[in-house]
Image (cartoon, grey):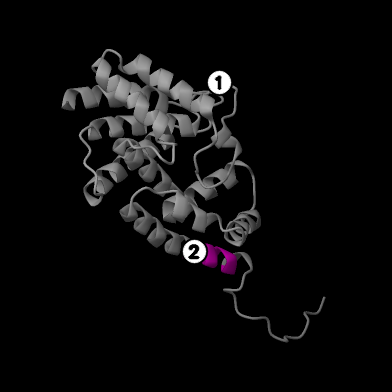
Amino acid sequence: MQDAWAAIQAAAAKVLAPKAPGHADPPRYALDRALRVIRAIDRLAPLTPDSFPHLHLARAAALYATIAQCGCHTPAGTPSPHGQSPANGQKPNDDQGLNDAIELASDQLKSILPPDDLDLLTRILREHRRRHTSLPEARLLADALCLEEFGLIGFWHQLRAFHAASKSPEQLLKLWKAQHDYGYWDTRLRDGFHYPAARAVAHSRLDHMQSLFDRLQLENACEDLPAPTNAPALNH
């Protein structure tokens, strides 16, 4: 399996790593994200009540789920939904993008994986966005992907997207306030995870995320500077 895993990574990296005109992401960004999701899968798996007889396929599916998220499948010159929206790195509502990533996986891996494994991998990809999937590998992948929204990583995704869209820190702070006012994060914590262990990690990360936004609010308002004094006006 080690040789197969190396071949799978090499195949997916052809799409995840290079920069092509019109791609939403620069070199390494999408690949780094995929590898981080795989690390989350490996860490979360032992913390759940489920067994994962096909964990290797969940790890492989993470590569192609990231391709779908980051718009790496998008033809040159066509902006991806993820590139257009600065909202938290959440899954774009992009069924065509997922279908394209599944088709890519089927093409790239048909000579690497046995047919039954390839069929299960594509099923994991299709079902990881379904809230009530019974497939444990799909649930595990979904939770690992959802963790990308939270904490320092989630904050970094937001900063990156806002910078790419030439938006200001003030606009980022307004988004953060609106998300809290409308209960976005409470909903994500409640409905975005299958496993309590992943939800607990997300909750902890959200606390760190809040502290970062508090600091950004402070510095954006320059409230970390000494209060003004009644000094006499300068002579001109």
Pick whichever, 65 or 28, lies toward us. Answer: 65
Residue beneath the point at 27% across and 12% down = 111
The location of residue 231, given as percent across then percent down, is 72, 85
Name the amino acid type tagged 2: Gln
Residue 160 relative to residue 125: left or right: right
Q: Residue at x 54, y 23 (%)?
A: 21
Q: Main secondary structure of the magenta part?
A: helix
The answer to whether any part of residue 79 appears in the image is yes
> For residue 115, which quarter of the picture?
top left
Mark 2, residue position:
210
Quadrant where the C terminus lies?
Answer: bottom right
Check if residue 217 falls in the magenta segment: yes
Quadrant showing the N terminus: top left
- Place of residue 17 in the rendered image (x, y in percent of width and height, measured from the top left): 40, 28
Q: Which is more toward the observer, 139 or 22? A: 139
Q: Secondary structure at mark 1?
A: loop
Residue 172 position in % (x across, y down): 61, 54
Residue to which mark 1 is pinned: 76
Kindly indicate the quadrant of the structure image that contains residue 34: top left
Q: Which residues are magenta?
A: 211-218
Seen at 65% across and 54% down, the residue is: 171
The picture quadrant where one finds residue 220 is bottom right
